[in-house]
Amino acid sequence: MNVTFICLTDETYRKFHHRWVDDLISEGHTVTWISEDWGEKEQLEQAGVDFRETPIARNPYPRKLLRSWWELHKTVTDVQPDVIVSEGTIPSLLARYVTIRDELPQIKILHSWPWH
């Protein structure tokens, strides 16, 4: 099974998801990580993750969202995931619209704002 993570940055792997991702890989699943590269790309690749650098909008400006949607659409079409795990409001929104016709199972991880 191809489990694809869509996050704002690759730092999210080290901070939150490394155990989950490492367990998926050890169980024989393919894991693809879609995000911006903030310097942890090599760590992901060493863990056996297929890293795809794709810009993800950080704010809801229409032009940025449209650009992110288009880039994410191309990447997800290439990857052909079986399930998508998205973290954050904008990545989750984009993941939903990228896969709206495919009816892929999606897991959305949403946290409160950091200043709360």
Image (cartoon, rainbow, N blue to C red):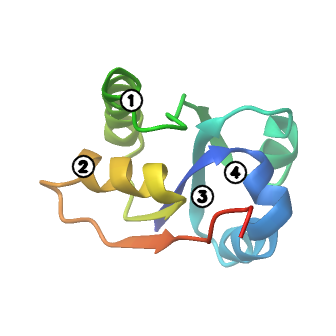
Q: What amino acid type should be assigned to the residue bearing mark 4?
A: Val
Up-down relation of residue 59 to residue 106 (above or below) = above
User: Is residue 8 toward the left or the right of residue 57 in the image?
Assistant: right
Specify which label sits upstream in the sequence, 1 or 3.
3
Q: Nearer the viewer, mark 4 or mark 2?
A: 2
Image spot of residue 116 (x, y percent): 71, 70
Q: Which mark is residue 31?
A: 3
Q: Secondary structure at mark 2?
A: helix
Mark 4 in CB contact with mark 3 (< 8 angstroms)? yes
Q: Nearer the viewer, residue 23 or 58?
A: 58
User: Hey, which quadrant is residue 8 in on the image?
Assistant: top right
Specify which label sits upstream in the sequence, 4 or 2.
4
Image spot of residue 75 (x, y percent): 41, 34
Q: Nearer the viewer, mark 4 or mark 1?
A: 1
Q: Which mark is residue 61?
A: 1
Q: What amino acid type should be assigned to the residue bearing mark 2?
A: Tyr
- Which residue does the image show at 27% across and 65% down from the upper left? 104
Crowd class of label 1 (few under 14; some 14 to 19; many from 20; radius 10 Å): few
